[in-house]
Amino acid sequence: MTTITDRFLGPRINPADASSRSIRYGMPGFLLLAARVLLLVSLFLPYWRMELQAPQYPDGLHMTAYLNSLTGDVAEIDGLNHYIGMRSLYEAAEIERTVGVFILIAFVVMLELAAFVHTRWAALLVAPVVFFPVVFLVDLHLWMRHFGLNLDPNAPLSNAVKPFVPTALGKGGIGQFITIATPGPGLMLATVASFVLVTALYFHRRAYLPLVKQQNSAA
């Protein structure tokens, strides 16, 4: 009789079969491990960078965003933004920066669990990690859009600047100020991890779907 746990975890592999088909059954776990390593390394790297160029700043102003902090010339950029009525960058994504590291650690744990699940439930554990880079960029865009479209009408230069949507990636700007936003190495590693996980799901399905069908037919 198949238990609920068996239906979730899926069939176990016969040791002899696992030894004779080590690549077939080992590839999903190897790729999941690679994705976990990529995510863990990304924790310590910048996820987003922005450079502001202006005539009065020949070397430009630079800001770097990690999952849990902002570094660089944030105070100077906030000072310029104040004149057009934009809120401080420290006020953006406060919750995301508070829980970001913990979410990524949770993702690593989910991928660890997915390595032991031989059914389609593994895809549900992996899916949030696959879409994480896209969610990060969408969240970044929404915050920048909110800040740019809700300028303080009482700011010193409020009449000179109309509401706008800052560029989350690429080149943008307003007036004499030019911004260049680029993904950081952390976000790049997380994106690579997403592609690795999609590949892992392919090999996972190829390895375990026949066993699941066999288990269901015998139940």
Image (tube, rainbow, N blue to C red):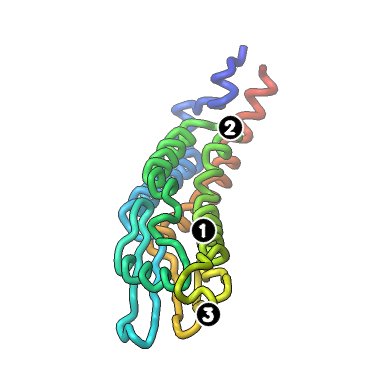
Secondary structure of the residue carrying tag 1 is: helix
Q: Taking the image as drawn, is residue 22 in sight?
A: no
**How many neighbours does mark 2 have within 10 angstroms: few (below 14), some (14-19), or many (20 or more)?**
many
- Mark 2–mark 1 Cα distance, whole angstroms, equals 37 Å
Residue 49 lies, in percent from the top left, at 39, 67
Q: Quadrant of the C terminus?
A: top right
Q: Which residue is farthest front?
A: 154
Answer with the quarter of the image where residue 69 lies.
Answer: bottom left
| Mark with earlier residue (2, 1) | 2
Specify the amino acid type for callout 1: Trp
Q: Quadrant of residue 6?
A: top right
Does residue 143 show up?
yes
User: Which residue is at 45% across, 74% downward?
Assistant: 156
Structural crowding at the residue carrying mark 1, measured as other residues with C-alpha within 10 Å and reported as few (<14), some (14–19) or many (≥20) = some
Q: Which residue in the protein does label 3 denote?
A: 160
Q: Position of residue 211 (x, y in %)?
A: 60, 30
Q: Which tag is nearer the camera, tag 3 or tag 1?
A: 3
In x, y percent, where is residue 135? 54, 53
Q: Amino acid at mark 2?
A: Thr
Considering depth in this image, is 27 or 187 the residue closer to the camera? 187
Q: What secondary structure is found at the residue carrying circle 3?
A: loop
Instruction: Examine the rendered structure and indicate whether residue 219 appears above or below residue 125.
Output: above
Mark 2–mark 3 CB contact (< 8 Å)? no
Mark 2 lies on residue: 119
Dot 3 amino acid type: Ala
- Residue 137, how many percent across, how many down? 52, 59
Name the residue at 47% across, 76% down: 157
- Residue drawn at x 67%, y 23% is 216
Q: Which residue is mark 1?
A: 143
Instruction: Check disc 3: other Cα within 10 Å, few if <14, some if 14-19, many if 20+.
Output: few
